[in-house]
Amino acid sequence: MRAQNSATRSTPIAVGDPATAVRSRAAPPASCPESPASPASPAGPAGPAPARHPRKATPADSPAAPAAPARRAALRTRGARGGTMLACLGVVAFSLTFPATAWGLESFGPWSFVAVRSVLAAAIAGAFLLAARAPLPARRHWPGLAVVAGGVVVGYPLLTTLALTTATTSHAAVVVGLLPLTTAALSALRTGVRPSRRFWAAAVAGAAVVLGFTLAQSGGSLSAGDGYLFAALLACAAGYTEGGRLARDLPGWQVIGWALVACLPLNLAGAAVGLAYEPVHLGVHGVAGLLWAAAGSTFLGLYVWYRGMAEIGAPRASQLQLAQPLLTLLWSVALLGEQLSPAAPAAACAVLVCIAVTQRAQSG
């Protein structure tokens, strides 16, 4: 019994007793994860059993493995909700653009307003890029950034500002009502994605509701600025589509940031010429409109918009803009004193139904 007990201990054993030495060699080292032989599992007649090492764990052994698909689905749902929220914040920021522009035109001419607005937005974007030490975009990204710059940094602001010199904000909201459908169509052509028929039916219905409502608000007549508005529609849709594609590779704020910085030399020259030839009468409304158009609409709005569009896709994100004309009309009443038609609640409900249908429609 004394010899057997000594064989089961992990302390060193004297080698004077041959039987004891044999038994001590049969026991595995103390560092082995397996315990030594015990009375419940004695060594067989052929010799001691080889030491077993723990089997490497496989994904199937993990108790969380069956829940992985559920976790992935939950993350996708959370990402879709977050993307929808960001896109909605972008829509709210954009809905203030026309009233802010109308305020800005009280102090600036159209050319100087757009140029100074872009210069201020580029300064904000450049400060963020420097603070984050953002690397330069890859060479393959610059053609897309040029489209973004031409569409949403120069084209859309300039064309809509020129239109607002002859049209009211409610009439200019027509372009925003048509923008979701145009963006979805250009996105489908650019990316090859084909939304379902239900998606297109709801998108066309929503655009028709918004178009009819905004035309009714303006008396149903076309203004001289309609050419500017339709050109702005195409420019903005192209910029949104390309920006949403780039936001899958670059953070959304870097997409608009680099586009603004790339246009800075052009906008600096435009600001110098515009301020030299257009009169400036600084006022509270003019300065407030300029600051919001630069920081809110051009940088912050486009940042959250591109980030949300990267999460949920350009066609679905664009349909959230169906609510933008209605929000613009509400801001026009609150900030500019324009009269709102009694048909606004009915139009708002119809637009919300169209948005709900497009959000549930699966892309083909």
Image (cartoon, grey):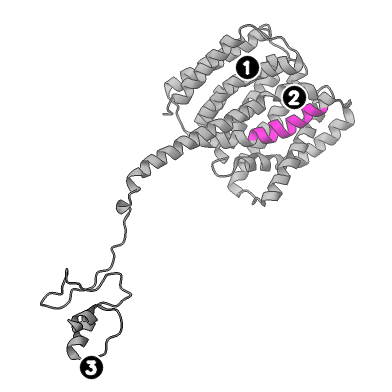
Q: Is residue 294 highlighted in magenta?
A: yes
Query: Where is residue 55 shown, x and y percent of the image?
Result: 28, 63
Q: Main secondary structure of the magenta part?
A: helix
Helix, strand or loop status at disc 1:
helix
Residue beneath disc 1 = 326
Q: For the magenta stretch, what is the residue range?
A: 287-302
Q: Is residue 186 left or right of residue 294?
A: left
Kindly report the distance in space between the C-alpha atoms of the residues bearing marks 3 and 1: 98 Å
Q: Quadrant of the N terminus?
A: bottom left
**Disc 3 marks which residue?**
16
Q: Residues within 10 Å of mark 3 (few under 14, many from 20)?
A: few
Residue 172: x and y, percent? 69, 17
Q: Earlier in the sequence, mark 2 or mark 1?
A: 2
Label 1 near label 2: C-beta < 8 Å? no
Q: Please give the residue where the numbered disc 2 appears in the rendered image.
A: 100
Label 2 and label 3: CA atoms lie apart by 99 Å
Residue 354, horizontal then vertical, whole percent: 50, 18
336 relative to 221, above or below: below
**SS class of the residue under badge 3?**
loop
Which of the two labelled residues, at mark 3 and mark 1, occupies the earlier sequence position? 3
Q: Residue at x 70, y 32 (%)?
A: 296
